[in-house]
């Protein structure tokens, strides 16, 4: 990425990164830092909210205001912060366990409210930090520490769910395409209303080796091959069962966001009470 050298909001004092070799989190972090540079975001106006998990440690490496909160509740904290200070640029970083499994209900309702937040969910298809248990996004049949014979459940289509719930911007990319990921994050932060960027990423320590991808590079290659357009996805028989996923922009619209509507309604109430 050409902008990679600037990364003005990188907290160099926290380096080296704590993530395993071959993990995709560093690529997503880099994409976010480059996006923030491109948007000329100032640390005083940025709040990073993280839940618990490997990706939840990302705020350590970002030089901005941060809230590191309880597992699954990052969107609830972020909603409170944004409602209290609508000027803040709030970016919420969650794993698939954090954001879609224990935190799934918050995800649905934050999208429904269309809160003006940007969420980046790193989907590594399992609970990384706690030993590779299956999450709500683990594909059917995958081997994890809690599905040793293959996951009997079906994984969530996170973008489909959030789009149906009403978010203004929804996109999915793989870490095999860092520049596209950065571009989606830029669009998501620019968009008023709720934005979700799902980053498909390898867990090269726990998920890969259990699922016939011993080397990190095999996981990256697999992600690159399985990221397809909607048209291609629709043309492949049993695409989901074969691990294909749609990459690109899933939703991009301008339904009114919570903060704008709330502010207008507050004005009405205040003037009815004779106060401004
Ligand atoms: C309420 C609560 N339940 C469970 C845990 C244990 N826990 C910590 S991290 C984690 C899973 C994280 O997985 P994910 O969100 O997918 O992030 P990753 O580590 O893969 O980046 C769990 C279950 C916790 N800290 N708090």
Image: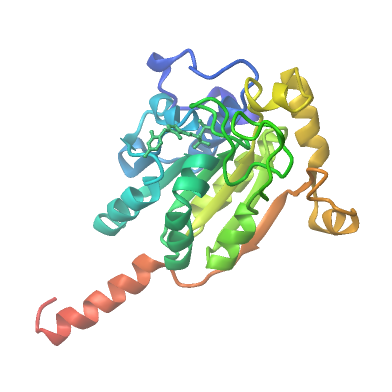
Image quarter (top left, top right, bottom left or bottom right) of the N terminus: top right
Residue sitting at x 64%, y 29%: 2
Is 254 displayed left or right of 49 in the figure?
A: right
Residue projecting furthest to the left: 274
Residue nearest the viewer, comparing 121 with 52? 52
Image quarter (top left, top right, bottom left or bottom right) of the C terminus: bottom left
Q: Position of residue 73 (x, y in %)?
A: 37, 46
Residue projecting furthest to the front: 149
Residue sitting at x 63%, y 37%: 125
Residue sitting at x 67%, y 59%: 250
Q: Report the number of numbered marks.
A: 0
Is 251 displayed left or right of 268 in the figure?
A: right
Position above or below: 152 against 201 = below
Q: Quadrant of ligand 1?
A: top left
Q: Position of residue 176 (x, y in %)?
A: 72, 32
Q: Decide if residue 17 is in sight here.
A: yes
Q: Position of residue 263 (x, y in %)?
A: 29, 71
Is 212 displayed left or right of 200 in the figure?
A: right
Q: Position of residue 100 (x, y in %)?
A: 52, 48
Q: Decide if residue 193 is in sight here.
A: no
């Amino acid at each position: 990425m050409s902008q990679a050298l600037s990364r003005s909001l990188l907290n160099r004092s926290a380096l080296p990164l704590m993530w395993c070799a071959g993990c995709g989190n560093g690529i997503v972090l880099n994409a976010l830092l480059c996006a923030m540079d491109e948007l000329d975001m100032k640390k005083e106006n940025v709040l990073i909210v993280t839940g618990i998990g490997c990706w939840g440690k990302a705020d350590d490496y970002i030089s901005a205001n941060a809230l590191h909160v309880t597992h699954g509740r990052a969107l609830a904290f972020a909603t409170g912060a944004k409602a209290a200070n609508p000027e803040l640029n709030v970016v919420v970083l969650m794993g698939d366990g954090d954001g879609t499994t224990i935190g799934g209900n918050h995800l649905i309702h934050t999208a429904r409210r269309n809160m003006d937040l940007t969420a980046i969910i790193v989907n590594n298809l399992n609970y990384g930090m706690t030993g590779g248990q299956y999450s709500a996004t683990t594909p059917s049949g995958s081997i994890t520490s809690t599905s040793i014979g293959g996951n009997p459940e079906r994984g969530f289509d996170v973008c489909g769910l959030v789009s149906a719930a009403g978010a203004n911007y929804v996109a999915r990319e793989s870490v095999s395409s860092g520049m596209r990921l950065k571009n989606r994050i830029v669009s998501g932060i620019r968009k008023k209303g709720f934005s979700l960027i799902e980053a498909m990423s390898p867990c090269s320590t726990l998920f890969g080796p259990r699922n016939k991808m011993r080397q990190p590079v095999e996981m990256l290659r697999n992600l690159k091959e399985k990221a397809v357009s909607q048209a291609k996805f629709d043309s492949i028989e049993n695409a989901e069962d074969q691990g294909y996923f749609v990459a690109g922009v899933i939703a991009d619209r301008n339904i009114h966001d919570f903060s704008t509507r709330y502010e207008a309604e507050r004005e009405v109430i205040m003037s009815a009470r004779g106060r401004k």
